[in-house]
Image (cartoon, grey):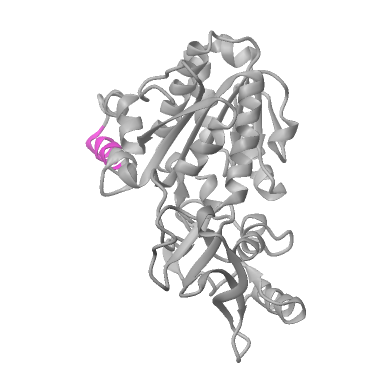
Amino acid sequence: MTRLAGRIARQIEAAGPISVADYMALCLFDPEDGYYTTREPFGVDGDFTTAPEISQMFGELVAVWLHEAWTALGRPSSPVIAEIGPGRGTLMKDMARTLSRLASSLVRQARWALVEASPRLAAVQRETLQAGPAVFTWHETVATLPSGPLLIVGNELFDAVPIRQYVKFAQGWRERVVTLDDEGRLVLRAGAGGIDPSYLPPGAAEAPAGTIAEIAPARAALMEEIAARIAHERGAGLFIDYGYLRPALGDTLQALRQHEYDDVLAHPGEADLTAHVDFHALAAATRKYGLGAAFLTQGEFLLGMGLLERAGSLGGNAALAVRERLSGEVERLAGPDSMGNLFKAMAVLPEGVAVHPFPPAH
């Protein structure tokens, strides 16, 4: 049992079962024992590898898209270029480097910001970005970002925002909770709380007993905060994550530890907990503020932005080993059996603004 598991067990003994959302929040963000507050999760020596860590090409192409979005918005002066959930700072480093070559005037006038709640990760990001071409500021929330047009990126952000789960019984839906079995071990069971199926994905009312449904109010709230800012001061957002474009029923909660799937209750605070992102719900949150949303798979986005051409440019005069490495990176990022189809890209834009390679946002 991890130290956090013991604390959670004592909390349940004292106050009763906790929701899946509260369990996720404790596991990931507890100040003393949370996964993101105490561990180095990224890369070969961590538990998972994100797209920016796979290849510099990912950040370069995201930067090109930001430049095109800025141009489509009429090149507003002094925009805020922000990343939310910046990991080790690798994506921001590659974006800033690319934009310094592509549009040095934009780099000079922009306000560069990172939204990071973990002091430990913020320190890692400062080290990564210390020799960068821009001056960066750090913020714990979107609310404290500087005013002005906002160009914001989030990669593998929403999958770690806590979800709530519900289980179907003959009498209706009941919330899934984390509690203790007779031997004091953490287990998932149905709690006393219920929910009207109209708040759940389509098909919930007719679903058979035992079906699990997920909703993510915290994700919607975060997306609404970002959308309100873009609607008020203009801007654009690009969010890339793994998930689905149409609402669906099912259990997507998972744990990852040392690059292997783990039981979600086995190592609280020592394993990454995530759930697939319902992009339909995120789009609905943006539309509350009159914005449009457009979608592609990650593969479609990167190939549309010139991934193959960039790989060819980097490997044109390189040794065979370099070309083979670049080919492998392309396959991991865009291949249909790798990240290409599982990960989706969502562009958030003002109505009437289109940015290649996305279809018109609506």
Query: Is residue 58 depicted above or below 360 in this figure?
Result: below
The x and y percentages for residue 143 are 73, 34
**In this image, 74 relative to 355: left or right?**
right
**In this image, 180 relative to 251: left or right?**
right
- Residue with the most extreme right position: 14
Query: Is residue 53 depicted above or below 20 in this figure?
Result: above
The x and y percentages for residue 223 are 59, 38
Query: Is residue 125 depicted above or below 120 in this figure?
Result: above
In terms of image quadrants, where is residue 130? top right
**In this image, 237 relative to 326: left or right?**
right
Residue at the (64%, 75%) spot, across then down: 5
In terms of image quadrants, where is residue 343? top left
Residue at the (58%, 66%) spot, across then down: 270
The prevailing secondary structure element of the residues shown in magenta is helix
In terms of image quadrants, where is residue 2? bottom right
The x and y percentages for residue 288 are 58, 32
Asked if the magenta segment contains residue 150, the reply would be no
Front-lying residue, 48 or 362: 362
The x and y percentages for residue 75 are 55, 9
Residue at the (42%, 42%) spot, across then down: 51
Asked if the magenta segment contains residue 324, the reply would be yes
Q: Residue 60: in sight, yes or no?
A: yes
Front-lying residue, 181 or 281: 281
Residue at the (49%, 69%) spot, across then down: 167
Front-lying residue, 292 or 132: 292
Split into 4 quadrants, where in the image is the C terminus?
top left
Residue range (magenta): 319-328
Q: Residue 90: in sight, yes or no?
A: no
Split into 4 quadrants, where in the image is the N terminus?
bottom right
